[in-house]
Image (cartoon, helix red, strand yellow):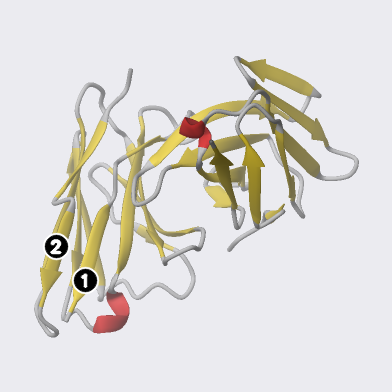
Amino acid sequence: SQQGEEDPQALSIQEGENATMNCSYKTSINNLQWYRQNSGRGLVHLILIRSNEREKHSGRLRVTLDTSKKSSSLLITASQAADTASYFCATDRDDYKLSFGAGTTVTVRA
Amino acid sequence: GAVVSQHPSWVICKSGTSVKIECRSLDFQATTMFWYRQFPKQSLMLMATSNEGSKATYEQGVEKDKFLINHASLTLSTLTVTSAHPEDSSFYICSATGGTGRDEQYFGPGTRLTVT
């Protein structure tokens, strides 16, 4: 079953601007992951943040995790046209299977 | 890095026929593979988990006789959609992990199935 809820559903920004999307989940987790999916393609793993971590960076990506609020955010700084994609958060269930959020579609305008 | 391939990348079949989709881990041994389906503009829904040499575990609501999964080796899992119907048209994605299932999952590029 789907655990994560993401907002916004869609985001349109100008190249160079930052993009922020949020993910909320319902049950306790071991870790939370963010993935990118280009149209009609498979998923690319972006970043994993463990439940005892609060913030993680990878290049232009910054992920935060607030386990008290059961929420995470993904920030993409200085967006580029290549960042146009759908972004999904995924939490691991008790049995370590992944449960994906609904996704945020990001469009970066030139 | 770990690479997972899927074949075919897209397939069109007639209603009532069966279609087999292959998922291969190219440079690591995948003890666990996962099959997802994704409808247009929607999220991925886990269908089943397969472990090498044992029966697949299906998620609630997924018909195991409809979606046959075989994980015959440490590098290959197959999903067969039997007696396909138009409502089975979807994007099927597999992922593989080399550990206990807690490790990072590596995703295949997906297979677009269209049933006419």
* Camera-side residue of B60 and A109: A109
Number of numbered tags placed on the structure image: 2
Residue B56, relative to residue B73: is it above or below?
below
Q: Residues within 10 Å of mark 1 (few under 14, many from 20)?
A: some
Q: Which mark is residue A97?
A: none
Q: Residues within 10 Å of mark 2 (few under 14, many from 20)?
A: some
Q: Amino acid at mark 1?
A: Thr
Q: Which mark is residue B11?
A: 2
Which quadrant holds the N terminus of chain A? bottom right
Chain ID for label 1?
A: B
Residue B101, relative to residue B15: is it above or below?
above
* Circle 2: element type: strand
Q: Confirm or deny contact between disc 2 and disc 1 (CB under 8 A).
A: yes
Can residue A61 be seen from the camera position used here?
yes
Q: Is residue A110 left or right of residue A61?
A: left
Identify the residue at horizontal 52%, vertical 34% (top origin).
A83
Task: Where is residue A69? Give x, y as percent.
Answer: 89, 44
Residue A53, relative to residue A106: is it above or below?
above
Residue of label 1? B114
Q: Is residue A67 left or right of residue A33?
A: right
Q: Is residue A74 left or right of residue A65?
A: left
* Circle 1: element type: strand
> Upstream in the sequence, badge 2 or badge 1?
2
Q: Quadrant of the rendered structure where residue B21 is?
A: bottom left
